[in-house]
Amino acid sequence: MIKKRVLTLILMLMIVVCCVTEALVIKDMKLENQQLNERLEKMDQDISRNTSAIEAANERLETKAEAETPVLFLPKDIYVSAGAVVDIYNDCVCSGVNLENYEFFWECEVGDCMEEKFRIYSSEDMIGDHTLKLHLYNYQLQEVAAVQTTLHIVPNVFQDENTGMLSMLTIGDSLSASTAWLSYTRYLSGEKLYHMGTLGDTEGLMNEGRPGISAEDYLEGTLYGAKVANAFTNPQTGEFDWDYYKQTTGMDPDVVQIFLGTNGLELDPSANAGNIVAIVDKIRETDNDIPILVVEPVFPANQDGMAMQQNISGFERLHGVWSLARSVMVFNLNSELDNRLADYENVTIVPAGVMFDRSYGFGQSEININPHSDVLETVPDQGIHPSQAGYGQIGDAVYGALCYLISEGKIETTPMEETGE
Protein backbone atom coordinates (compact mmCIF):
# COMPACT_ATOMS: atom_id res chain seq x y z
CA MET A 1 0.00 0.00 0.00
CA ILE A 2 2.84 2.32 0.93
CA LYS A 3 4.65 1.36 -2.24
CA LYS A 4 1.61 2.24 -4.33
CA ARG A 5 1.36 5.69 -2.72
CA VAL A 6 5.07 6.35 -3.33
CA LEU A 7 4.68 5.48 -7.01
CA THR A 8 1.64 7.74 -7.28
CA LEU A 9 3.51 10.60 -5.65
CA ILE A 10 6.47 10.13 -7.99
CA LEU A 11 4.17 10.09 -11.00
CA MET A 12 2.47 13.28 -9.84
CA LEU A 13 5.83 14.95 -9.31
CA MET A 14 6.91 13.95 -12.80
CA ILE A 15 3.69 15.39 -14.21
CA VAL A 16 4.26 18.65 -12.32
CA VAL A 17 7.87 18.85 -13.57
CA CYS A 18 6.76 18.25 -17.13
CA CYS A 19 4.06 20.89 -16.83
CA VAL A 20 6.48 23.40 -15.34
CA THR A 21 9.05 22.61 -17.99
CA GLU A 22 6.49 22.98 -20.77
CA ALA A 23 5.28 26.21 -19.26
CA LEU A 24 8.83 27.54 -19.20
CA VAL A 25 9.37 26.42 -22.79
CA ILE A 26 6.14 28.12 -23.85
CA LYS A 27 7.17 31.25 -22.02
CA ASP A 28 10.58 31.23 -23.78
CA MET A 29 8.88 30.65 -27.12
CA LYS A 30 6.55 33.57 -26.51
CA LEU A 31 9.52 35.75 -25.59
CA GLU A 32 11.43 34.66 -28.69
CA ASN A 33 8.34 35.22 -30.80
CA GLN A 34 7.95 38.71 -29.37
CA GLN A 35 11.63 39.44 -29.99
CA LEU A 36 11.29 38.07 -33.51
CA ASN A 37 8.28 40.25 -34.14
CA GLU A 38 10.20 43.25 -32.82
CA ARG A 39 13.16 42.44 -35.11
CA LEU A 40 10.82 42.00 -38.07
CA GLU A 41 9.19 45.33 -37.30
CA LYS A 42 12.62 46.97 -37.07
CA MET A 43 13.65 45.36 -40.35
CA ASP A 44 10.49 46.72 -41.96
CA GLN A 45 11.38 50.17 -40.65
CA ASP A 46 14.97 49.81 -41.92
CA ILE A 47 13.76 48.66 -45.32
CA SER A 48 11.39 51.58 -45.45
CA ARG A 49 14.16 54.00 -44.53
CA ASN A 50 16.57 52.40 -47.02
CA THR A 51 13.96 52.51 -49.74
CA SER A 52 13.43 56.20 -49.05
CA ALA A 53 17.20 56.75 -49.02
CA ILE A 54 17.60 54.90 -52.31
CA GLU A 55 14.78 56.88 -53.87
CA ALA A 56 16.33 60.12 -52.60
CA ALA A 57 19.76 59.06 -53.89
CA ASN A 58 18.32 58.18 -57.29
CA GLU A 59 16.53 61.51 -57.35
CA ARG A 60 19.81 63.28 -56.54
CA LEU A 61 21.60 61.29 -59.25
CA GLU A 62 18.91 62.20 -61.75
CA THR A 63 19.15 65.84 -60.72
CA LYS A 64 22.95 65.68 -60.92
CA ALA A 65 22.75 64.05 -64.35
CA GLU A 66 20.54 66.89 -65.50
CA ALA A 67 22.83 69.48 -63.93
CA GLU A 68 26.02 67.79 -65.15
CA THR A 69 25.65 67.44 -68.88
CA PRO A 70 29.00 66.62 -70.46
CA VAL A 71 29.77 68.55 -73.62
CA LEU A 72 32.46 67.15 -75.90
CA PHE A 73 34.25 69.08 -78.62
CA LEU A 74 36.80 67.97 -81.16
CA PRO A 75 37.68 70.10 -84.19
CA LYS A 76 36.59 68.46 -87.41
CA ASP A 77 40.20 67.91 -88.49
CA ILE A 78 43.49 67.40 -86.66
CA TYR A 79 46.79 67.51 -88.54
CA VAL A 80 50.01 65.74 -87.58
CA SER A 81 53.23 65.73 -89.57
CA ALA A 82 54.91 62.33 -89.79
CA GLY A 83 57.52 61.98 -87.06
CA ALA A 84 55.80 64.29 -84.58
CA VAL A 85 54.55 63.15 -81.17
CA VAL A 86 51.21 64.80 -80.45
CA ASP A 87 48.81 64.66 -77.49
CA ILE A 88 45.10 65.49 -77.36
CA TYR A 89 43.98 66.21 -73.81
CA ASN A 90 40.82 65.08 -72.02
CA ASP A 91 40.49 68.35 -70.09
CA CYS A 92 40.59 70.35 -73.34
CA VAL A 93 37.82 68.43 -75.12
CA CYS A 94 35.21 68.13 -72.36
CA SER A 95 33.24 70.78 -70.50
CA GLY A 96 30.32 70.97 -68.08
CA VAL A 97 31.29 68.16 -65.69
CA ASN A 98 33.82 67.04 -63.14
CA LEU A 99 36.16 64.93 -65.26
CA GLU A 100 36.96 62.66 -62.32
CA ASN A 101 33.41 61.27 -62.48
CA TYR A 102 33.94 59.90 -66.00
CA GLU A 103 36.21 57.66 -68.02
CA PHE A 104 37.55 58.70 -71.43
CA PHE A 105 38.16 56.06 -74.06
CA TRP A 106 39.90 57.06 -77.29
CA GLU A 107 39.38 54.73 -80.22
CA CYS A 108 41.61 54.83 -83.30
CA GLU A 109 43.55 52.38 -85.46
CA VAL A 110 46.71 54.30 -84.57
CA GLY A 111 47.82 56.02 -81.37
CA ASP A 112 47.33 55.24 -77.70
CA CYS A 113 44.47 55.84 -75.28
CA MET A 114 46.12 57.02 -72.07
CA GLU A 115 44.67 58.03 -68.70
CA GLU A 116 44.45 61.77 -69.37
CA LYS A 117 45.00 62.04 -73.12
CA PHE A 118 45.33 60.43 -76.52
CA ARG A 119 48.90 60.21 -77.80
CA ILE A 120 50.07 59.57 -81.33
CA TYR A 121 53.67 58.65 -82.13
CA SER A 122 53.30 59.39 -85.83
CA SER A 123 55.43 57.77 -88.50
CA GLU A 124 55.52 57.59 -92.28
CA ASP A 125 53.78 54.22 -92.35
CA MET A 126 50.77 55.87 -90.67
CA ILE A 127 50.36 58.55 -93.35
CA GLY A 128 46.70 58.85 -94.30
CA ASP A 129 43.35 59.74 -92.74
CA HIS A 130 42.24 57.98 -89.58
CA THR A 131 38.93 58.25 -87.72
CA LEU A 132 39.52 59.18 -84.09
CA LYS A 133 36.56 58.62 -81.75
CA LEU A 134 36.18 59.68 -78.14
CA HIS A 135 33.72 57.81 -75.91
CA LEU A 136 32.76 59.19 -72.50
CA TYR A 137 31.54 56.68 -69.91
CA ASN A 138 30.18 56.94 -66.40
CA TYR A 139 31.16 54.38 -63.77
CA GLN A 140 28.17 52.21 -64.61
CA LEU A 141 29.86 51.63 -68.00
CA GLN A 142 27.16 53.65 -69.72
CA GLU A 143 28.24 55.81 -72.65
CA VAL A 144 27.01 59.32 -71.95
CA ALA A 145 28.60 61.17 -74.87
CA ALA A 146 30.73 60.60 -77.94
CA VAL A 147 32.44 62.66 -80.62
CA GLN A 148 34.82 62.01 -83.49
CA THR A 149 37.29 63.76 -85.77
CA THR A 150 39.53 62.97 -88.71
CA LEU A 151 43.19 62.57 -87.82
CA HIS A 152 45.30 63.50 -90.84
CA ILE A 153 48.83 62.14 -90.62
CA VAL A 154 50.72 63.83 -93.44
CA PRO A 155 54.23 63.80 -94.88
CA ASN A 156 56.77 66.18 -93.39
CA VAL A 157 56.81 67.97 -96.73
CA PHE A 158 59.45 70.55 -95.86
CA GLN A 159 61.99 67.73 -95.73
CA ASP A 160 61.34 67.10 -99.41
CA GLU A 161 63.89 68.92 -101.56
CA ASN A 162 61.12 69.73 -104.03
CA THR A 163 59.28 71.81 -101.41
CA GLY A 164 60.19 75.45 -101.77
CA MET A 165 59.88 78.49 -99.53
CA LEU A 166 56.65 79.54 -97.87
CA SER A 167 55.97 82.96 -96.35
CA MET A 168 53.39 83.36 -93.61
CA LEU A 169 52.12 86.41 -91.77
CA THR A 170 50.49 85.95 -88.36
CA ILE A 171 48.00 88.49 -87.01
CA GLY A 172 47.89 87.96 -83.28
CA ASP A 173 48.44 89.06 -79.71
CA SER A 174 51.21 88.37 -77.18
CA LEU A 175 51.18 84.65 -78.04
CA SER A 176 52.47 85.63 -81.49
CA ALA A 177 54.66 88.49 -80.32
CA SER A 178 56.83 85.87 -78.65
CA THR A 179 59.02 84.23 -81.28
CA ALA A 180 59.13 80.86 -79.46
CA TRP A 181 56.71 78.95 -81.69
CA LEU A 182 57.71 80.96 -84.77
CA SER A 183 61.36 80.00 -84.38
CA TYR A 184 60.38 76.38 -83.69
CA THR A 185 58.30 76.04 -86.87
CA ARG A 186 61.01 77.78 -88.89
CA TYR A 187 63.51 75.26 -87.50
CA LEU A 188 61.23 72.30 -88.33
CA SER A 189 60.93 73.53 -91.91
CA GLY A 190 64.69 73.76 -92.41
CA GLU A 191 64.18 77.54 -92.58
CA LYS A 192 61.90 77.18 -95.60
CA LEU A 193 59.06 78.72 -93.58
CA TYR A 194 59.53 82.48 -93.53
CA HIS A 195 57.56 84.45 -90.95
CA MET A 196 56.98 88.05 -92.05
CA GLY A 197 55.46 91.18 -90.56
CA THR A 198 56.29 94.68 -89.35
CA LEU A 199 57.15 93.64 -85.78
CA GLY A 200 60.24 91.85 -84.49
CA ASP A 201 63.95 92.19 -84.98
CA THR A 202 64.98 88.94 -86.69
CA GLU A 203 64.48 88.25 -90.39
CA GLY A 204 62.32 85.21 -90.91
CA LEU A 205 60.77 85.60 -87.46
CA MET A 206 58.80 88.81 -87.94
CA ASN A 207 55.13 88.95 -86.98
CA GLU A 208 52.06 91.06 -86.33
CA GLY A 209 51.59 90.07 -82.71
CA ARG A 210 50.54 92.92 -80.42
CA PRO A 211 50.34 92.16 -76.68
CA GLY A 212 46.93 92.76 -75.14
CA ILE A 213 45.08 93.25 -78.41
CA SER A 214 41.80 91.57 -79.29
CA ALA A 215 40.10 90.84 -82.59
CA GLU A 216 37.72 93.73 -81.86
CA ASP A 217 40.69 96.07 -81.39
CA TYR A 218 42.03 95.10 -84.80
CA LEU A 219 38.66 95.71 -86.43
CA GLU A 220 38.20 99.11 -84.78
CA GLY A 221 41.80 100.22 -85.15
CA THR A 222 42.54 100.35 -81.42
CA LEU A 223 45.22 98.95 -79.18
CA TYR A 224 44.79 98.29 -75.44
CA GLY A 225 41.42 99.99 -75.75
CA ALA A 226 43.02 103.33 -76.63
CA LYS A 227 42.66 105.07 -79.98
CA VAL A 228 46.10 104.04 -81.19
CA ALA A 229 46.30 102.96 -84.80
CA ASN A 230 47.94 99.69 -85.78
CA ALA A 231 49.39 98.74 -89.16
CA PHE A 232 46.05 97.34 -90.36
CA THR A 233 44.06 100.49 -89.66
CA ASN A 234 43.11 102.51 -92.71
CA PRO A 235 43.20 106.14 -91.50
CA GLN A 236 40.43 107.05 -93.92
CA THR A 237 37.97 104.61 -92.36
CA GLY A 238 39.51 103.85 -88.97
CA GLU A 239 38.91 100.16 -89.63
CA PHE A 240 40.84 97.00 -90.45
CA ASP A 241 41.89 97.08 -94.10
CA TRP A 242 43.94 94.19 -95.51
CA ASP A 243 44.55 95.88 -98.85
CA TYR A 244 45.75 99.05 -97.10
CA TYR A 245 48.12 96.98 -94.98
CA LYS A 246 49.65 95.24 -98.00
CA GLN A 247 50.08 98.46 -99.95
CA THR A 248 51.65 100.45 -97.12
CA THR A 249 53.94 97.72 -95.78
CA GLY A 250 54.83 95.87 -98.96
CA MET A 251 53.91 92.58 -97.32
CA ASP A 252 52.46 89.94 -99.62
CA PRO A 253 52.53 86.57 -97.81
CA ASP A 254 51.68 83.16 -99.25
CA VAL A 255 49.58 82.42 -96.16
CA VAL A 256 47.96 84.58 -93.51
CA GLN A 257 47.28 83.24 -90.03
CA ILE A 258 44.96 84.65 -87.37
CA PHE A 259 45.86 83.77 -83.79
CA LEU A 260 43.45 85.79 -81.67
CA GLY A 261 40.75 85.27 -79.04
CA THR A 262 42.72 85.07 -75.79
CA ASN A 263 41.90 88.73 -75.22
CA GLY A 264 38.18 89.40 -75.32
CA LEU A 265 37.06 86.08 -73.83
CA GLU A 266 33.47 85.87 -72.58
CA LEU A 267 31.23 82.96 -71.58
CA ASP A 268 29.13 83.78 -74.62
CA PRO A 269 31.63 83.43 -77.50
CA SER A 270 29.43 85.11 -80.10
CA ALA A 271 31.09 88.53 -80.14
CA ASN A 272 34.68 87.27 -79.93
CA ALA A 273 34.17 84.61 -82.59
CA GLY A 274 32.26 87.08 -84.73
CA ASN A 275 35.15 89.53 -84.64
CA ILE A 276 37.66 86.83 -85.66
CA VAL A 277 35.40 85.73 -88.52
CA ALA A 278 34.97 89.40 -89.52
CA ILE A 279 38.76 89.69 -89.96
CA VAL A 280 38.63 86.62 -92.21
CA ASP A 281 35.85 88.29 -94.21
CA LYS A 282 37.79 91.56 -94.46
CA ILE A 283 40.82 89.75 -95.86
CA ARG A 284 38.60 87.91 -98.33
CA GLU A 285 37.18 91.21 -99.62
CA THR A 286 40.44 92.01 -101.37
CA ASP A 287 42.29 88.69 -101.40
CA ASN A 288 39.96 85.94 -102.56
CA ASP A 289 42.45 83.11 -102.86
CA ILE A 290 44.98 83.49 -100.06
CA PRO A 291 44.95 80.54 -97.66
CA ILE A 292 43.90 81.57 -94.14
CA LEU A 293 44.71 79.67 -90.96
CA VAL A 294 42.77 80.37 -87.76
CA VAL A 295 44.48 79.10 -84.61
CA GLU A 296 42.42 77.96 -81.64
CA PRO A 297 43.30 79.81 -78.41
CA VAL A 298 44.93 77.57 -75.82
CA PHE A 299 43.57 76.87 -72.36
CA PRO A 300 44.83 78.66 -69.23
CA ALA A 301 46.75 77.07 -66.38
CA ASN A 302 44.96 76.02 -63.20
CA GLN A 303 43.93 78.48 -60.48
CA ASP A 304 47.45 78.52 -58.99
CA GLY A 305 48.77 79.70 -62.35
CA MET A 306 46.12 82.39 -62.67
CA ALA A 307 46.98 83.58 -59.15
CA MET A 308 50.67 83.78 -60.04
CA GLN A 309 49.84 85.66 -63.27
CA GLN A 310 48.49 88.69 -61.41
CA ASN A 311 51.88 89.16 -59.70
CA ILE A 312 53.59 89.78 -63.05
CA SER A 313 54.01 93.46 -63.85
CA GLY A 314 51.31 94.62 -66.25
CA PHE A 315 48.86 91.85 -65.33
CA GLU A 316 47.52 93.22 -62.07
CA ARG A 317 44.14 93.67 -63.77
CA LEU A 318 43.78 89.88 -63.80
CA HIS A 319 43.32 89.87 -60.02
CA GLY A 320 40.46 87.54 -59.20
CA VAL A 321 40.32 85.83 -62.60
CA TRP A 322 38.82 82.35 -62.23
CA SER A 323 40.59 79.60 -64.16
CA LEU A 324 37.48 77.41 -64.48
CA ALA A 325 35.40 80.21 -65.98
CA ARG A 326 38.23 81.15 -68.35
CA SER A 327 38.56 77.51 -69.42
CA VAL A 328 34.85 77.37 -70.27
CA MET A 329 35.27 80.58 -72.28
CA VAL A 330 38.09 79.06 -74.33
CA PHE A 331 36.12 75.83 -74.84
CA ASN A 332 33.06 77.77 -76.02
CA LEU A 333 35.10 79.99 -78.34
CA ASN A 334 36.94 77.11 -79.99
CA SER A 335 33.74 75.16 -80.68
CA GLU A 336 32.06 78.34 -81.96
CA LEU A 337 34.94 79.08 -84.35
CA ASP A 338 34.86 75.52 -85.65
CA ASN A 339 31.14 75.82 -86.38
CA ARG A 340 31.23 79.29 -87.93
CA LEU A 341 34.15 78.58 -90.24
CA ALA A 342 33.09 75.07 -91.24
CA ASP A 343 31.83 76.09 -94.69
CA TYR A 344 34.55 78.65 -95.47
CA GLU A 345 36.69 77.69 -98.44
CA ASN A 346 40.45 77.77 -98.03
CA VAL A 347 40.16 78.53 -94.31
CA THR A 348 41.79 75.99 -91.99
CA ILE A 349 41.36 75.67 -88.23
CA VAL A 350 44.63 74.94 -86.42
CA PRO A 351 43.57 72.79 -83.43
CA ALA A 352 46.15 74.10 -80.97
CA GLY A 353 43.60 74.29 -78.16
CA VAL A 354 43.03 70.54 -77.83
CA MET A 355 46.74 69.77 -78.33
CA PHE A 356 47.99 71.99 -75.50
CA ASP A 357 49.08 70.65 -72.12
CA ARG A 358 47.54 73.10 -69.68
CA SER A 359 49.09 71.26 -66.71
CA TYR A 360 52.71 71.36 -67.86
CA GLY A 361 52.64 73.76 -70.79
CA PHE A 362 53.58 76.66 -68.52
CA GLY A 363 56.74 77.39 -66.56
CA GLN A 364 56.90 76.06 -63.02
CA SER A 365 57.76 77.82 -59.75
CA GLU A 366 58.29 76.62 -56.20
CA ILE A 367 56.51 78.41 -53.37
CA ASN A 368 56.18 77.74 -49.63
CA ILE A 369 53.21 75.52 -48.96
CA ASN A 370 52.26 77.95 -46.18
CA PRO A 371 53.93 81.16 -44.97
CA HIS A 372 55.65 79.46 -42.02
CA SER A 373 56.68 76.20 -43.65
CA ASP A 374 59.91 75.27 -45.39
CA VAL A 375 58.01 72.70 -47.45
CA LEU A 376 57.75 73.74 -51.10
CA GLU A 377 55.11 73.01 -53.69
CA THR A 378 55.36 73.39 -57.45
CA VAL A 379 52.84 75.62 -59.22
CA PRO A 380 52.61 77.16 -62.72
CA ASP A 381 54.50 80.44 -62.83
CA GLN A 382 51.63 82.06 -64.72
CA GLY A 383 48.38 81.19 -66.43
CA ILE A 384 48.38 82.63 -69.96
CA HIS A 385 51.80 82.60 -71.65
CA PRO A 386 53.25 79.12 -72.23
CA SER A 387 56.75 77.86 -71.55
CA GLN A 388 59.03 76.80 -74.38
CA ALA A 389 57.44 73.35 -74.17
CA GLY A 390 53.95 74.82 -74.47
CA TYR A 391 54.93 76.98 -77.43
CA GLY A 392 56.41 73.84 -78.99
CA GLN A 393 52.98 72.18 -78.88
CA ILE A 394 51.44 75.22 -80.58
CA GLY A 395 54.20 74.99 -83.19
CA ASP A 396 53.44 71.30 -83.81
CA ALA A 397 49.78 72.17 -84.47
CA VAL A 398 50.65 74.99 -86.90
CA TYR A 399 53.35 72.96 -88.65
CA GLY A 400 51.07 69.94 -89.08
CA ALA A 401 48.37 72.10 -90.69
CA LEU A 402 50.87 73.67 -93.09
CA CYS A 403 52.25 70.26 -94.08
CA TYR A 404 48.71 69.06 -94.74
CA LEU A 405 47.82 72.05 -96.92
CA ILE A 406 51.01 71.75 -98.95
CA SER A 407 50.67 67.98 -99.40
CA GLU A 408 47.06 68.47 -100.55
CA GLY A 409 48.09 71.14 -103.06
CA LYS A 410 46.10 73.82 -101.23
CA ILE A 411 49.23 75.92 -100.69
CA GLU A 412 51.96 76.40 -103.24
CA THR A 413 55.54 77.04 -102.21
CA THR A 414 58.04 79.14 -104.10
CA PRO A 415 60.85 77.16 -105.77
CA MET A 416 64.20 77.69 -104.05
CA GLU A 417 65.88 79.00 -107.21
CA GLU A 418 63.33 81.81 -107.44
CA THR A 419 64.10 82.97 -103.91
CA GLY A 420 67.85 83.03 -104.36
CA GLU A 421 68.30 80.50 -101.55
Image (tube, rainbow, N blue to C red):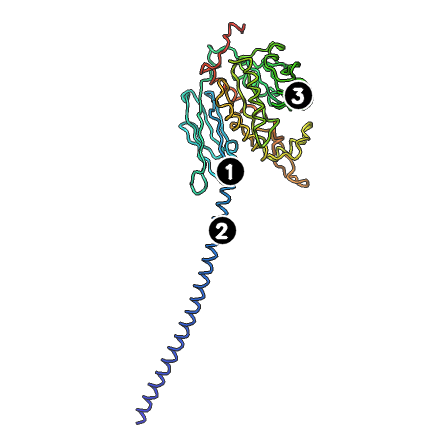
Q: Is residue 346 above or below residue 386?
A: above
Q: Which residue is mark 1?
A: 99
The C terminus: image quadrant:
top right
Classed neighbour count for the residue bearing mark 1: other residues with Cα under 10 Å, few (<14), some (14–19), many (≥20): some
> In the rendering, which numbered label is found on residue 222?
3
Q: Which tag, 2 or 1, sits closer to the chain's start?
A: 2
Q: Secondary structure at mark 3?
A: loop
Tag 2–tag 3 contact (CB < 8 Å): no
> In the rendering, which numbered label is found on residue 224?
none
Q: Secondary structure at mark 1?
A: helix
The foreground one among 316 and 373 is: 316
Classed neighbour count for the residue bearing mark 3: other residues with Cα under 10 Å, few (<14), some (14–19), many (≥20): many
Question: How far across and down, in percent of the image, does residue 83 sit?
Answer: 46, 21
Amino acid, disc 2? Ala
Amino acid, disc 1? Leu
Q: Nearer the viewer, mark 3 or mark 1?
A: 3
**In the image: residue 52, left or right of residue 274:** left
Q: Is residue 342 above or below residue 116?
A: above
Q: Which tag, 3 or 1, sits closer to the chain's start?
A: 1
Question: How far across and down, in percent of the image, does residue 66 sit?
Answer: 50, 42
Q: Which tag, 2 or 3, sits closer to the chain's start?
A: 2
Q: Is residue 229 above or below residue 372?
A: above
